[in-house]
Image: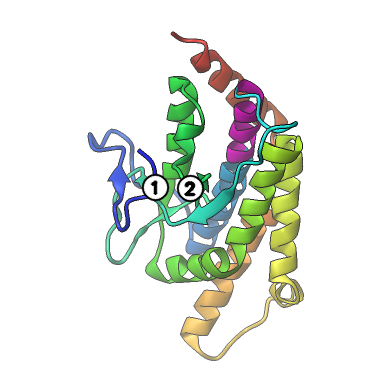
Amino acid sequence: MGNLPQGRRVHINKAGHKTRFTPSRSDHERLTIYGRRRYYSVARVMALFEIVREHENLGGGNSPIRVDAAGAYWQAFGGTTDAPACHTCPALLMLDGNLPTLITHNMGLRRHIIVVFADCMMMPALVNRVDRYFDDSLGWPAFESSASRVLNEGAGWQDGLGYYTEAMREIFGDMIAIINGNARFSDPETQQSFEACQAFYEGLFLTALNHAEMTNYIRSVRLEMAIP
């Protein structure tokens, strides 16, 4: 499958064996978990693209791969009107105008690419709107640039993750001081939006990378790639 079909969304968990619900004690905790899931989804994409670069012998003297952010194509499951299924990846990354799975013929690697770009959490509709603001208008270029460095410039996955988080920190800019200052707003929706940003910030920027978890993830990808 090549160019992304407009408006189409493919659900990969049609059997319903994966739960749609993420346990949490409060909305704030849920939003923080979402930010943390975002952090690890970006880390996994960078790790997969480093493996792709090595496996497909990209970079070096080869023509650079064009990386373009796009709306989601794969989705783990469907949400509801009040609680949409929000993707934990900032965007789908198209490679030379094609779905990222077409960069390799290895079926194990393809499966992991689909799974990470399909991953999502059910979140309040307001969070989905805040998330779209940061991703669609600001975060996509950061994700594109970070992935391109890994695919084309020989950067490691941890470097790619670092580029992304620093770019997002610049996007937050002056908001960081406001977030850390626990500001209060008289308008309830503005306050709710602020709290969503605050929790998302905590999850994305205050998460410590679990190196053992990522090492195990990369090992599992490589093991699956070796299956004929």
CB under 8 Å between discs 1 and 2: yes
* Image quadrant assignment for residue 15: top left
Task: Pinpoint residue 55: horizontal percent, then vertical percent.
Answer: 61, 21
Q: Quadrant of residue 83?
A: bottom left
Furthest residue in direction left, as rendered: 15
Along the line of sight, the residue nearer the viewer: 228 or 39: 228
Q: Which residues are magenta?
A: 44-55
- Which x, y percent locates residue 14? 24, 38
Q: Amino acid at mark 2?
A: Gly
* Horizontal arrangement in the rendering, residue 93 relative to residue 9 (left or right): right
Residue underneath mark 1: 3
Residue 76 among magenta residues: no
> How many angstroms separate mark 1 from mark 2 (CA)?
6 Å
Q: Nearer the viewer, residue 217 or 142?
A: 142
For disc 2, the marked residue is 97
Using the rendered image of the protein, determine whether residue 155 is visible from the camera's viewpoint: no
